[in-house]
Amino acid sequence: MELNISLAPNILFEIGSFPVTNTFFWSLVIGLFLIILTFFVRARLKLVPGGLQNIIEFLLESGYSFVKSVIGTERKTRRIFPLVFTMFIFTLVANLAVYIPGQAALTLRRGGEIIPVFRAVMSDYGMVFIMTLITFLATQIVAIIIHGPFGYLGKFINLKGPLQFFLGLMDLVGELAKVISLSFRLFGNIFAGEVLGAVMLFLAPFFIPLPFMFLGILTAIVQAFVFAVLTLVFVTMASEIDENELVESASI
């Protein structure tokens, strides 16, 4: 038996010239599952909720209250909550789906190599990077709406003095660094957990891997929460108006 660990996702098949990887296929399955589940619950809403509706309502109400406690106002909460909650639910389900019993046994032979059909979606840096870009773009759009195009650019290009110009460049570097830090945090933890689980299962395939599996499940939950919270924090920071802007708007 050979232990095969690959940083890049495996290609299952091609549609024309478009390669379909196992992480991309798994993300489609998870996305379709969440869409079907949403319509299923929506079509069966009851005044007295049952088990599944109870769980979903609890998640929605708890998440909404948490977002409101961070961002402050009802108006802002209604606008940002769908993005934050979608990030959390998709990441959580994608991370936990790896621990479905039996899915690791589904393999495909391609080019003389046996490759797994399913793989942790967030162990594909491309997928994590795209999600991080969505967060980054949402943050910049909110900043432009709140501060205006010239106020937004003035944060990074400040010609009032050498120090202000240097601090503006540091702000620009900080914004770009958010993409790297946010994406590598999620990708690194999930990929490391997947590799550690595979190694322990390869070395001792019975009871020894169980503690590492429980640790991986805990990491999957925590990382989904952290990614969503950081998205919320970045957008909240972008929507804040500092005292100088308040003074300028008041003088106008």
Image: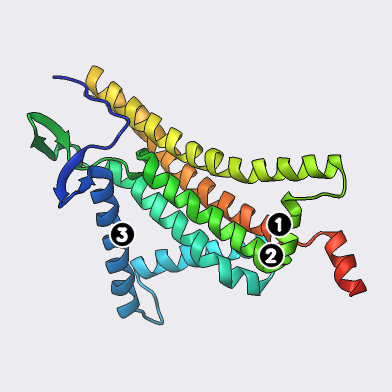
Badge 2 element:
helix
In the image, what residue type sits under mark 3? Gly
The answer to the question of whether label 3 and label 1 lie on touching residues, with beta carbons closer than 8 A, is no
What is the C-alpha distance between the residues marked 1 and 2?
6 Å
Residue where numbered disc 3 is placed: 31
In the image: residue 48, left or right of residue 156: left
**Front residue of 207 and 12:** 12
Instruction: Give the mark nearer the N terminus: 2 vs 3.
Output: 3
In the rendered image, the quadrant that contains the C terminus is: bottom right
**Front residue of 31 and 18:** 18
Q: Residue at x 31, y 67 (%)?
A: 35
Residue where numbered disc 2 is placed: 149
Q: Quadrant of residue 41?
A: bottom left
What is the C-alpha distance between the residues marked 2 and 3?
35 Å
Q: Residue at x 69, y 62 (%)?
A: 239
In the image: residue 198, left or right of residue 161: left
In the image, what residue type sits under mark 2? Pro
Badge 3 element:
helix
Residue where numbered disc 1 is placed: 153
Residue 26: where, in percent of width, then height?
A: 25, 49
Badge 1 element:
helix
Residue furthest to the front:
159
With respect to residue 97, does 47 lie above or below? below
